[in-house]
Image: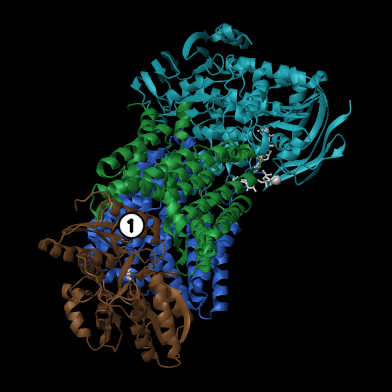
Chain colours: A brown, B blue, C green, D cyan
């Protein structure tokens, strides 16, 4: 956009910034690429002109710098996958003061200056937790391989899942951290199996299920131990191979395409539209979890995604039309 | 002047068995502690599992040991990223096919060695402190990884690699352990029984004196960094055999633990003193500790604190420096 | 004998001029690429970004000068920040209390490091790596999930300018002044001596152990100051906020001309080094380097900067063979 | 005069070595008391127990009849003890002023440094030695940029600035030239007059006789006696120190490769930062000495020939072949050996085993494919040197830092003898070496020459130069000022020649 200094405001075409503070994950790559593809569509329509991408492994301080750079670049809106739920509050205010609209994806932030466009992480966790509770039954024993303790998404997910297990009277024997990393997940699960060889199930999050599976498989306990899986191709390949032996699992999609949904929202908002009542709760717009891969629909999803590389996450995003329905 | 006393040179070539034995004792103590708090921890199968996990760290730490012994602030912070990169290259080239295993490993190790060469040249010719040279290299390698993969690591371990790492040979021990033992022996031999090893210790102990004794110090250092990256690459390939699939951050987390394993094994960061046997035991100690902490259900925060405290206790047992007053 | 002294040099030590030249180059390039570089917002926001790294780099410098290194400084920033923000609870009247808490935590962390390094004689890289676990674990205990808020007045003032001078720049000048004062104190003299040659210092009546402890305590003090800057910059608490500052602080120290071997250098250079590091990130962004290559270019620029500084040493060292 | 210092039954054990085995020493205020003994006899260790850097296992130290507890250097300082140790305690990156006041910096309020007072104190302490710095005190220079002799003087000044009652000088003259030694002696005599006790250790007996009143002799960590020097002859003292002098062993050193007998080293117009147009020729079998005042480029010349200095002009030919003067490694491969002047920094690997220190320069010859070492042959090689040089050690696996200074020096020399060098460059090879070992080293040098090697020798000891050299080049300001040959090579001639060249520096 051509208006100098204060950034933001003005009409089409819009400049959009993306701030992503973590690149050591294929999920994030998919997120960025998906956004770029959707952006190109808007570009053809002349709605937007430039997507400024800030994407690097960094911490909160670095992400603040990223956002300030985007502000200095006069973007009209910023889509951010935040490294912290709270610690970007002040820089979000800076953006807001310059008339820039900010949309947080993947994880909600506390700042009132931001619109969160996220799936419900608690619900996401509940789906697989309920499935696992059903599999192991009342009195069943499970272990848990979580992401990183203290991480907002991790806490939201685990608090919801914990409640599910408590309600279902499932015993959680141990909770360990797998750092959202397959290799670590594999090692952690191996250690857990040494102490708890007779568990009935393991609940884990996306990014670790493949490693957990391999650990259980190496211990030759796939038949005895139920695993809550993930909707990623690598895991689904293992799932597919083990299906013949009666292995069952579940994969709730955590869509990298959330960024695309947020882009639709951003364009609508920049066009001056406001959210329809009931579509926004405080400053959070909850987008639906696209779908869940389960025993029943496995074939269908495997058929569609099986050709992708192992790290590919099954995906989904709102269409522009669906996004428009969120606005008055 | 009394007659020169030349004692029977019983340990001429073996240096300080102390730290190694001590580290070993600690590993055993941790295993026993593990068995007490969570029965099953000391089972044969679990011990083998722990050893297998320790092997990755152990192999990566071979190079770290060499670089640290070389002195001058020697340390290689890029080992984790290099290991990741090697696994990524290897998996893409072998793509789950045994036929391409050898070229895949060769290419991955060659690229790793080239990165080590750049580290070595930066440290010697351009005199960049190793800490910062290899730290900067992390960013460079990360960029190479993104450029090479486009942000999506793909490819898969060849079955032969997986069965080498995971497959059971005699005594139900995975092939990986035999491989680690062989590499470990190679490292010990290299350090203790070759001119390269003795030159390395000399350069680490006193670089000026080494040069004035006719040692090509720069060349020795460059080789040290090349070896460091190569062993890191090898560690990454082995890890690939374990996980079978590859990820953008597969081995990144080995950076500082590899240094810790070396130090716990009694090698001095000041250079010129140490050896690989201690490092190997150090890798086992760290792995057993992680395993133990995993099975303790004390929550993430508590686990992190305990991890730090136990590390301090381990270090204070023998990772200590000389005192100024004797 | 200068020839041999050069052979002995453990690494490059940048001269003050090299560091200043780097800074000038970074500023020139950055302002060429970023049209509004000199605008009020860009200036205040840039300086606001620099302060945490600058503060922690000064602390790291003192530790490095003493012959050590502190890989737990980032975790100390986190722990100090979460302790302060918990007490702060969004209330301006609690500010003195929160500042005292941050400083107290920083000093205590530094004392623990000093204890393990100086008294237990553990090797600093690994000892402080270990204490970093203790500090980050404690940070999670203090603040299990992100939260807490900093009074708006604080975050506003931090982003403000006084007579056109950004407050954050004043903060940096304050840190430089603090260094300037410390530099004139006996403790810092002893820090240089101990880092230069511990045995000689010991034989020369320098209280080696106490000096080392003090170096880490000062490191902790600056980590606490960094924590306050982080809070003013972020506006709230996060149990992971400072951890990644650690390695960057070491890079800043080296770019600033302090020898990692200890005993040579000073924090003035580190302050500039920290600013250069931050500017390089900006430059890479405004130069539109594709995201794939940003970290590559970032790493390469740091290596190249140090390499260029090392070339004179190279030429001095050997005859054209 | 009453007893000032009384050390009784002092014991100290390092691993397998009993460094002190019940040493005694009694001395009074106002005397210069020599502490003598062969290398490794425990002199430095005894000094260190007094200075607080070593805590003895047992024994008693009394000062003024009071039992003294010396737990660290600062306890020693409180008791009025200051020491100049064999291994200097100079911090190279601090300035001379900062070094002189180190640990006792004058401060203003709240511990802030008083720079002016520090300078004044340093200037006062160094003033006496101004001549050694050609009149200008380098107060603001980093001490590490000074030459070894200058550093030694700074160290002495530092001790003097502490106004001690007991001053320990442990081989404080080892790096000093005759003129500098004279100034130091003058100062010591004044201190003696003021009632200070000076404990003086040196392997140069002429110095001992010139300066000291009494001497206590140690052997194997035990005191063998205290003598009045005025009533003692040199031979008697030597016998007390080393027992009967051993016959220099039958020193068959490894001969240089066959056909090397006629080796000729020709140096033409060699120029560096510190050397100006140096030319000379030496033949196999000849010992060429380098004389002159200290610091006139002697060490630089040796380093240059070894490829460790930056050469701006000139060349050197060995048997007509140009020598690569670009790297020590190449020099070593061309058959050149250098025993450098600064043992700690340039010569040895303190933390490494004696074995490796000895093997390093020559191991590739014994290694399979220049790479794979055989433990047995390395052991044998090291043992040969230990026996030949009579190195006193516990085990060859011990770090070389556990050896006494003199024995360390033998290791540094020994590593090259295994390499069959054609040219041997020696920079002050007997620094800190005791009488007996000196004889052994002299014998080695002669044997090397007899076997056809070329020897170039720099020595701070003119007596040594005179004794060993066939010819001496006197250097002045980096250039050859005079050549003394055959009969002209005498100690007196050397001294006068050196002094005559530096009229401005009459000391
Ligand atoms: N070789 C060494 N390298 C590094 N640090 C050392 C070394 N030797 C000792 N130190 C450190 O120096 C200290 C010296 O011991 P000591 O306690 O006597 O110190 P000090 O100078 O007397 O101080 P204080 O009197 O305050 O205790 C040791 O505690 C240790 O921290
Ligand atoms: N730090 C140490 N560790 C082990 N052994 C040591 C140490 N310091 C000295 N020794 C041993 O103690 C003995 C006495 O050494 P010391 O340095 O006191 O001898 P010295 O009489 O001063 O000899 P020199 O004339 O060579 O200086 C020697 O055998 C030496 O090897
Ligand atoms: O943000 C997270 C992403 O980085 C990880 O890889 O997968 C889960 C996501 O919630
Ligand atoms: Mg001595
Ligand atoms: Mg003390």
**As drawn, B67 above or below D507:** below
The residue lying at 47 percent from left, 50 percent from top is B192
Q: In the rendering, at what x and y percent does residue D346 appear?
A: 51, 33
> In the image, is D21 to the left or to the right of C257?
right
**As drawn, A262 above or below B137:** below
Task: For residue C123, say whether it is visible.
Answer: yes
Residue that lies at the very extreme toward the left in this rendered image: A44
Q: In the rendering, at what x and y percent does residue D170 appear?
A: 69, 30
Q: In the rendering, at what x and y percent does residue C158 appear?
A: 44, 51
> In the image, is A36 to the left or to the right of B303?
left
The residue lying at 28 percent from left, 53 percent from top is B111
Tell me if mark 1 has few (under 14), some (14-19) or many (20+) residues whose alpha carbon lies within 10 angstroms of its own: some
The residue lying at 29 percent from left, 89 percent from top is A246
Chain assignment, label 1: A
> In the image, is B57 to the left or to the right of C63?
left
The N terminus of chain D: image quadrant = top right
Number of marks present in the image shown: 1
Residue that lies at the very extreme toward the bottom in this rendered image: A138
Task: Please name whichever residue, C225 or D182, is drawn nearer the observer in this view of the structure.
Answer: C225
Q: In the rendering, at what x and y percent does residue C175 appear?
A: 50, 43
The C terminus of chain D: image quadrant = top right
Q: Is the shortest distance between ligand 3 and the CB of mark 1 under 8 Å?
A: no
Q: Which residue is mark 1?
A: A97
Task: Please name whichever residue, C8 or A1, is drawn nearer the observer in this view of the structure.
Answer: A1
Ligand 2 - quadrant of the structure image: top right
Q: Secondary structure at mark 1?
A: helix
Task: For residue B125, say whether it is visible.
Answer: no
Task: Please name whichever residue, A250 or C276, is drawn nearer the observer in this view of the structure.
Answer: C276
Task: Please name whichever residue, A232 or B207, is drawn nearer the observer in this view of the structure.
Answer: A232
Q: Residue A206's image quarter?
A: bottom left
**As drawn, A211 above or below D246:** below
């Amino acid at each position: 956009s051509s208006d100098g200094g204060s950034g933001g405001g003005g009409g089409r075409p819009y400049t959009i910034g993306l701030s992503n503070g973590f690149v050591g994950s294929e999920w994030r790559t998919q997120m960025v690429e998906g956004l770029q593809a959707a952006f190109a569509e808007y570009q053809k329509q002349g709605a937007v002109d430039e997507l400024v991408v800030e994407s690097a492994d960094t911490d909160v301080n670095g992400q603040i710098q990223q956002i300030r750079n985007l502000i200095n670049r006069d973007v009209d809106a910023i889509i951010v996958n935040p490294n912290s739920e709270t610690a970007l509050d002040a820089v979000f205010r800076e953006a807001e003061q310059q008339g820039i609209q900010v949309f947080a994806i993947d994880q909600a932030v506390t700042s009132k200056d931001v619109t969160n466009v996220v799936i419900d992480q608690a619900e996401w966790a509940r789906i697989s937790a309920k499935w696992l509770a059903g599999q192991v039954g009342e009195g069943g024993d499970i272990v848990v391989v979580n992401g990183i303790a203290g991480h907002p998404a991790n806490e939201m997910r685990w608090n919801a899942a914990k409640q599910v297990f408590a309600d279902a009277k499932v015993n959680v024997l141990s909770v360990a951290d797998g750092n959202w990393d397959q290799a670590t997940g594999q090692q952690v699960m191996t250690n857990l199996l040494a102490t708890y060889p007779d568990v009935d199930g393991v609940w884990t999050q996306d990014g670790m299920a493949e490693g957990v599976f391999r650990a259980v498989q190496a211990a030759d306990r796939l038949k005895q131990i139920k695993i809550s899986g993930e909707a990623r191709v690598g895991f689904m390949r293992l799932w597919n191979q083990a299906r013949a032996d009666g292995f069952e699992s579940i994969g709730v999609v955590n869509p990298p395409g959330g960024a695309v949904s947020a882009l639709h929202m951003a364009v609508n908002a920049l066009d001056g539209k406001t959210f329809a009542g009931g579509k926004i709760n405080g400053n959070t717009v909850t987008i639906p979890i696209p779908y869940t891969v389960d025993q029943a629909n496995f074939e269908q999803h495997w058929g569609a995604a099986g050709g992708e590389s192992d790290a590919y996450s099954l995906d989904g995003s709102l269409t522009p039309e669906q996004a428009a329905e969120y606005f008055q | 002047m009394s007659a020169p006393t030349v004692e029977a040179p019983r340990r001429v070539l073996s240096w300080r068995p102390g730290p190694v034995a001590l580290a070993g004792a600690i590993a055993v103590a941790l295993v026993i502690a593990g068995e007490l708090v969570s029965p099953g921890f000391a089972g044969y199968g679990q011990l083998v599992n722990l050893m297998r996990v320790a092997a990755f760290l152990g192999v990566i730490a071979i190079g770290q040991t060499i670089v640290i012994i070389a002195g001058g602030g020697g340390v290689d912070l890029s080992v984790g990223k290099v290991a990741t990169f090697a696994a990524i290259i290897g998996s893409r080239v072998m793509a789950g096919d045994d036929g391409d295993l050898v070229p895949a490993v060769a290419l991955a190790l060659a690229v790793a060695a080239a990165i080590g060469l750049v580290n070595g040249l930066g440290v010697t010719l351009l005199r960049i402190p190793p800490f910062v040279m290899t730290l900067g290299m992390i960013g460079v390698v990360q960029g190479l990884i993104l450029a090479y993969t486009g942000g999506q690591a793909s490819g898969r371990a060849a079955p032969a690699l997986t069965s080498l790492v995971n497959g059971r040979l005699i005594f139900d021990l995975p092939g990986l352990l035999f491989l680690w033992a062989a590499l470990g022996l190679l490292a010990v031999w290299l350090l203790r029984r070759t001119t390269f090893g003795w030159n390395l210790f000399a350069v680490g102990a006193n670089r000026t004196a080494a040069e004035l004794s006719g040692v090509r110090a720069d060349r020795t250092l460059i080789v040290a960094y090349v070896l460091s990256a190569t062993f890191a690459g090898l560690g990454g390939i082995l890890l690939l055999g374990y996980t079978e699939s590859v990820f953008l951050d597969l081995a990144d987390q080995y950076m500082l633990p590899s240094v810790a394993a070396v130090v716990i094994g009694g090698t001095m960061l000041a250079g010129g003193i140490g050896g690989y046997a201690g490092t190997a035991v150090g890798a086992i100690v760290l792995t057993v500790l992680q395993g133990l902490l995993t099975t303790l259900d004390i929550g993430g925060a508590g686990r992190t604190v305990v991890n730090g405290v136990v590390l301090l206790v381990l270090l204070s047992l023998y990772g200590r420096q000389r005192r100024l007053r004797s | 004998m200068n020839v041999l002294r050069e052979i002995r040099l453990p690494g490059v030590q940048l001269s003050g001029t090299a560091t200043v030249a780097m800074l000038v180059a970074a500023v020139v390039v950055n302002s060429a690429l970023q049209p509004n570089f000199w605008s009020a917002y860009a200036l205040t926001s840039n300086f606001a970004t620099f302060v945490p790294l600058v503060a922690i780099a000064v602390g790291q410098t003192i530790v490095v000068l003493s012959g050590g290194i502190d890989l737990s400084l980032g975790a100390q920033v986190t722990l100090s920040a979460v302790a302060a923000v918990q007490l702060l609870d969004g209330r301006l009247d609690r500010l003195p209390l929160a500042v005292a808490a941050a400083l107290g935590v920083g000093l205590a962390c530094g004392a623990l490091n000093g204890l393990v390094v100086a008294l237990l004689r553990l090797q600093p890289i690994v000892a402080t790596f270990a204490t970093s676990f203790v500090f980050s674990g404690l940070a999670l205990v203090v603040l299990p999930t992100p939260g807490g808020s900093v009074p708006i007045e604080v975050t506003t003032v931090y982003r403000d300018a006084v007579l056109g001078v950004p407050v954050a720049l004043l903060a940096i000048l304050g840190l430089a002044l603090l260094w300037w004062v410390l530099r004139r104190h006996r403790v810092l003299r002893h820090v240089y001596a101990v880092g230069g040659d511990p045995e000689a210092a010991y034989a020369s009546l320098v209280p080696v152990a106490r000096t080392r402890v003090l170096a880490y305590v000062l490191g902790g003090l600056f980590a606490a100051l960094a924590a306050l800057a982080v809070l003013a910059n972020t506006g709230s608490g996060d149990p992971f906020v400072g951890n990644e500052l650690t390695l960057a602080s070491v890079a800043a120290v080296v770019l600033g001309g302090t020898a990692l071997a200890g005993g040579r250098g000073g924090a003035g250079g580190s302050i500039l080094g920290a600013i250069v590091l931050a500017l390089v990130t900006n430059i890479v962004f405004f130069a539109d380097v594709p995201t794939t290559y940003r970290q590559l270019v970032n790493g390469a620029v740091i290596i190249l900067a140090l390499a260029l500084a090392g070339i004179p040493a190279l030429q001095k060292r050997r005859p054209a063979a | 005069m009453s007893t000032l210092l009384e050390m009784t039954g002092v014991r100290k054990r390092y691993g397998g070595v009993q460094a002190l085995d019940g040493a005694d020493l009694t001395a009074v205020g106002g005397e210069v008391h020599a502490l003598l003994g062969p290398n490794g006899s425990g002199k430095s260790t005894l000094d260190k127990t007094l200075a607080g850097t070593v805590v003895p296992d047992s024994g008693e130290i009394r000062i003024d009849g009071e039992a003294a507890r010396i737990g660290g250097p600062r306890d020693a300082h409180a008791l009025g003890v200051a020491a100049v140790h064999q291994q200097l305690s100079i911090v190279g990156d601090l300035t001379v002023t900062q070094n002189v006041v180190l640990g006792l910096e004058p401060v203003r309020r709240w511990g802030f440094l008083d720079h002016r007072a520090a300078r004044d104190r340093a200037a006062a302490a160094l003033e006496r030695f101004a001549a050694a710095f050609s009149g200008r005190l380098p107060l603001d220079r980093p001490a590490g940029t000074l030459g070894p002799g200058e550093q030694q003087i700074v160290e002495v000044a530092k001790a003097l600035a502490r106004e001690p009652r007991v001053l320990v000088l442990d081989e404080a003259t080892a790096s000093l030239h005759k003129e500098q030694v004279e100034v130091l002696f003058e100062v010591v005599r004044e201190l003696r007059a003021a009632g200070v006790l000076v404990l003086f250790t040196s392997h140069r007996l002429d110095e001992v006789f010139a300066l000291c009143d009494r001497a206590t002799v140690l052997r194997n960590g035990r005191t063998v006696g205290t003598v009045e020097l005025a009533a003692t002859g040199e031979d008697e003292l030597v016998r007390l120190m080393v027992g009967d002098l051993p016959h220099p062993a039958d020193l068959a050193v490894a001969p240089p490769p066959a056909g090397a007998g006629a080796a000729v080293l020709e140096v033409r117009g060699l120029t560096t930062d510190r050397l100006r147009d140096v030319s000379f020729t030496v033949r196999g079998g000849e010992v060429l000495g380098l004389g002159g005042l200290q610091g006139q480029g002697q060490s630089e010349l040796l380093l240059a020939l070894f490829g460790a200095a930056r050469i701006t002009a000139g060349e050197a030919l060995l048997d007509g072949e140009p020598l690569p003067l670009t790297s020590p490694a190449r020099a070593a491969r061309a058959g050149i050996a250098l025993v450098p002047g600064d043992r700690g920094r340039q010569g040895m690997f303190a933390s490494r085993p004696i074995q490796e220190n000895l093997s390093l320069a020559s191991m590739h010859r014994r290694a399979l494919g220049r790479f794979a070492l055989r433990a047995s042959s390395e052991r044998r090689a090291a043992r040969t040197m230990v026996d030949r040089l009579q190195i006193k050690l516990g085990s060859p696996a011990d770090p070389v830092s556990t050896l006494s200074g003199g024995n360390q020096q033998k290791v540094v020399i020994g590593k090259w003898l295994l390499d069959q060098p054609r040219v041997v460059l020696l920079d002050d090879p007997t620094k800190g070496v005791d009488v007996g070992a000196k004889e052994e080293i002299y014998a080695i040098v002669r044997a090397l020459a007899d076997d056809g090697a070329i020897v170039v020798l720099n020595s701070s000891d003119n007596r040594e130069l005179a004794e060993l050299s066939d010819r001496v080049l006197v250097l002045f300001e980096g250039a050859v000022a005079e050549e003394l040959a055959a009969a002209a090579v005498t100690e007196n001639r050397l001294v006068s020649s050196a002094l005559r060249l530096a009229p401005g520096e009459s000391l």
